[in-house]
Amino acid sequence: MLFHQLPSDVLLHLANLLPNEELLTLACVSSALRHLLLDSSTIWTTIQLDDYYDLSTAKILLKRSKTASLDVVISSPLFDHVTTHLWSLSPERWRSLSLRALSDLEIADFLRHIQHPLPQLSRLQCLAADLEHLRTDAHKPILASASALRSLKIHGCVACLPPLTALTTLHVSRLSSNYHEFRALLEGLPNLETLILESILEPTDRKDTTYPVFEVPSVSRLAVSFIMDHLPSPSMKPLLTSLRLPNLEYLEISKDRGDYGEFTGKEFPKLATLALRDMSPFCSSNFALLRSLQLKVSRLEVYGVSGLDTLLAEGSWPALTTLVCEPAGDDSSSLPSWFSARANTIIMLPKRPEEDDDAVFYAEGLGGLLQPGQLVESTQWSDLDDDEDSFEDDFDLEFELGYHDEDEDYDDYEEDMDEWD
C-alpha cells in the first residue's frame, strides 16, 4: 500500500508524531494530503519558541490550529518578546506551557509579567539549569491567572505560589522552604493527590524546633529524595517530620538517608506500595524506616538497590503480593532462592533469570515518580547534565539555543517581527 492510500485516521496519527518542520513539509507532498492536514486543527497545536527563527512558524501554526488548545514551549531568549506580544500567541488557548531558562528567577520574572488570563492552562513545567539562585526574599505572587492548573513542575522556592485549588500534581526540585511556607503551600492545594519532592534542601529556619504537625488528607502519592544523607545540626528538624498524610497509598524514597522522623513512627493506614531507589547496601540501621512499613506493604518496587539479601530476608514483607525489582548492577544472585520461598508473590524483573521460570518479564525499565534530571532536560539541551559548568556564561546558553553565530543580528527577520508587532 502506498503512503497516500493509507486511511485518513492513520495519516493523521502519523502526522501527530512529526515535529513542526516535517509537518510543514508533509503538507506540500500533494494537494489531497495538504487538504487533509489543513482540515485537522489538532495536529498544529505544538508551538516551540526557542529563538526568533520560530516566530514565523508559530504564526502559521496559530492560524492552522484554529481554536484548538495549544501546547507551548518558550525558551528564555524570547521571554521579553512574548510578554510584550502575548496577545498574538493566543494565551487563552494554552493547554500546557513549558518554560526553559538558565535560572529559575528568570522563569519567575516571566510568569509575573503574564497578566492575561490562562483559563485552559492545566500543565506548567519550569526547566531551570542554574542551581545557584534558588531563593529570593522578594516573594511576589505568580500564576494568579492560571486558576485551572492541574500539574506543576517547578524548581527551588515555592513561597511565590498562590493557592491553586485545581492542582492535583506538584513536582518541586530542590525545595527551598521554611516550615511556614511549606505548610501554607500544601494547605493552599486542597485537591493535591501527587507530591514529588526531588532533592530536598534542609529547612531555612534551622533554629525553629517547635513545628506543630499538620495534615494533608488529599495526598495519596508521595516521592522524595534528599540532598544530604545526614543533618548538619542535631537541633535541625526536617520539614517532613511535621507532615501527616493519613491517606497515603504510594511512598517512594530515593538515595541513602538516615531517617530523622520523616517517616518512622508515623501511621500510614492505607499504604500499599513502597518504592526504593538508588540505595547502597542495607544494614541494621537502615531498617528503622522499613520496620514499621513491612507489615502493610503489598507491593514493593526496588530500583538500583544493592544488598538485596538483607532487604529481602526470610520472614520480611509478610503481606507482599508483588515485587518489582531492578537490582543495582549484577546484584540479583539472591533472587532465585527468594522466588521459591514466595510462591504467592508476583515477581517482575527487567529480564528473566535462567534459574526461574515463574518471574514475570518486566520490560518497562525504571518506573516510579522520580525521574532524576528531568528539570534540566529538553530537546535542545539533551546532552547537558546538572553540572553548573555546562552553563558557564551567556555564550554557552546562546550556543545551546542556536545563537552561536556571533555576527548574526537577525536583520533577515525584521519582516516577521513587524508582522508580530
Image: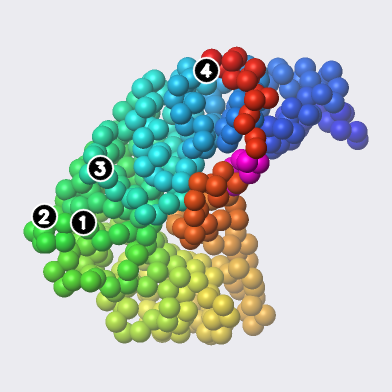
Please give the residue where the numbered disc 1 appears in the rendered image: 204
Between marks 1 and 2 in the image, the one whose residue lies nearer the viewer: 1
Tell me if label 1 and label 2 are in contact, CB under 8 Å: no
Mark 4: amino acid: Ser
The answer to which quarter of the image holds residue 317 is: bottom left
Q: Are discs 4 and 2 less than 8 Å apart at CB?
A: no
Visible in this render: residue 373? Answer: no
Instruction: Please indicate, yes or no, whether residue 189 appears anywhere in the rendered image.
Output: yes
User: Which image quarter is the C terminus in?
Assistant: top right
Characterize the local packing of mark 3: few (<14), some (14-19) or many (20 or more) Cα atoms within 10 angstroms: many
Most common SS among magenta residues: loop
Mark positioned earlier in the residue sequence (4 or 2): 4
Q: Is residue 395 magenta?
A: no
Task: Say which mark, if any, is on residue 212.
Answer: 2
Q: Secondary structure at mark 4?
A: helix
Cα separation, mark 2 vs mark 3, equals 19 Å
Left or right: residue 370 versus residue 290 is right
Which stretch is magenta?
Answer: 400-406
**Magenta highlight on residue 401:** yes
Q: Of 24 and 168, which appears nearest the observer?
A: 24
Q: Which residue is mark 4?
A: 88
